[in-house]
Image (spheres, rainbow, N blue to C red):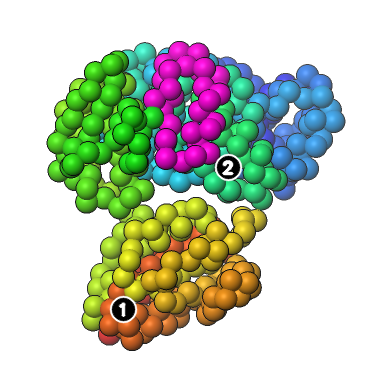
Amino acid sequence: MTDIIIYGKGKTGKSLYKMLEKQNIKAVLYDDKTGFSEENGFTENSVVLLSPGVLPTAKGITEAKNAGCKIISELEYCFPLCKGTVISVTGTNGKTTTCEMIGHILKYADKSIRLLGNGGVPLSAEVLDVDKDEIIVLESSSFQLDNAKNFAPYISVFTNIACDHLDYHGNYENYVKAKINNFIHQRNGYAIFNADDCNVAELSKFCQCTPLYYSLEKTDANCRIENGKISFVLDGKSFCIPSGCIDGYVKHNRYNALAAVLACVLAGVKADIAVEALNTYKLLPHRMQFVGSIGGVSFVDDSKATNVHATVNALDNYCEPLALILGGYSKGESFDGIFSNLRSNVITVAASGDTAKEIAECGAKYGVTVECFEDISLATEFCFKSVQKHGGGIVLMSNACSSFDKFSGYAERGDYFCKVVERLIRG
């Protein structure tokens, strides 16, 4: 019998297995579908290393608990092994972009960095190779932060919070409990919060290290935008650095940029270098990405919007006539947040995918007609014609749903939308 059991045979599980091999620690792999990779079982002496995404209600979790196993997350196991400085970013939306911005700025400033975590390279894949002079920029999801009871990065960033992943956590309260593990165990260093997100600002009261805030609205924030400049208030000193790009960002990317710049300054980058680096950053695809235009109609790919909060944020950036494409795979989230205060410039709503009928029923509660389609291509053509009739405007695909009903991920869904738009423009 082996005392270390890795729960999950996917990317993170295999990464954990290789890491333990390097430490000369024997382990076995387990998942609910195929069982153990060799003869084994859960016992009271077992330590179960949990891959992110394994549901708390999974069969093996119940068996492990009944056997008296100790269950810990990848993050909890790996963090004490990390010799470098960790910057951890969490939030319902904006994690990936903020991490990429931080990584770009640090590289520009000649810092040695590794981008690890959610959706990319697992922490366990490289943690043993990290030296003390490196900075780990870690994208931390609620799955990874769940049960991470000893996690204490040097700098934590909390972008925003809204209902998400209820299919995993069961309710919003459990989701929040997981998220606050990003900063709740810090006793040293800095915790960075979005002051304009009232829920994040409220949670910041539990911070036990040095809190700092960024904002587009509050003049007393540590980092904000002022007349085309990024304004800082740090260690009692106020100063501004001109920025050539930040006013051109959509609203949520301005927030991401402020969080990134502030984190990098706290990590030792001079403020003017950090802002200069930001001016050279190119935004990632499928995040409010302009795809093309024809006949006064512009198409925007926001496939990365996999929850309601992200879609509502996207809609806030437009005042011209807009047709909205929703739908995909359900994560158990209500769509009321979209329809309860739908902006008057939204002239058409279309839906496709597994959630199309549910979205249409939610829209009907608020007097909004939602046209349902079997495929994104049909929804896009319908929205294009609708906006044309209004003399031009925007066709926005911002799905408010995961993509796993028909696609391998949001990127494949976004690429498909771009191909549909390309055909429309050519035809």
Q: Secondary structure at mark 2?
A: loop
Please determine whether, in this image, residue 104 is positioned above or below residue 250.
above
Q: Which residues are magenta?
A: 184-212
- Asked if residue 116 lies left or right of residue 171, the reply is left
Q: How many marks?
A: 2
Residue 154: percent from left, percent from top: 42, 19
Choose between 388 and 409: the one closer to the eye. Answer: 388
On the question of residue 60 being in view, the answer is yes
Residue at position x 58%, y 71% in the image: 366
Q: Is residue 207 magenta?
A: yes
Tell me the crowding category of disc 1: few under 14, some 14 to 19, or many 20 or more residues within 10 angstroms, Cα based.
few
Q: Nearer the viewer, mark 2 or mark 1?
A: 1
Choose between 283 and 63: the one closer to the eye. Answer: 283
Q: Secondary structure at mark 1?
A: helix
Residue 77: percent from left, percent from top: 58, 22
The answer to which quarter of the image holds residue 10 is top right
Residue 115: percent from left, percent from top: 37, 33
* Mark toward the start of the polypeptide (2 vs 1): 2
Task: Determine which residue is flagged by label 1.
Answer: 423
Choose between 227 and 309: the one closer to the eye. Answer: 227
Q: CA distance from mark 2 to mark 1?
A: 36 Å
Q: Residue furthest right?
A: 66
Q: Quadrant of the N terminus?
A: top right
Please determine whether, in this image, residue 65 is positioned above or below residue 379.
above
**Amino acid type, mark 2:** Gly
Tell me the crowding category of disc 2: few under 14, some 14 to 19, or many 20 or more residues within 10 angstroms, Cα based.
few
**Amino acid type, mark 1:** Arg
Residue at position x 38%, y 83% in the image: 386
Task: Determine which residue is flagged by label 2.
Answer: 10
Please determine whether, in this image, residue 219 is positioned above or below residue 206.
below
Q: Is residue 132 magenta?
A: no
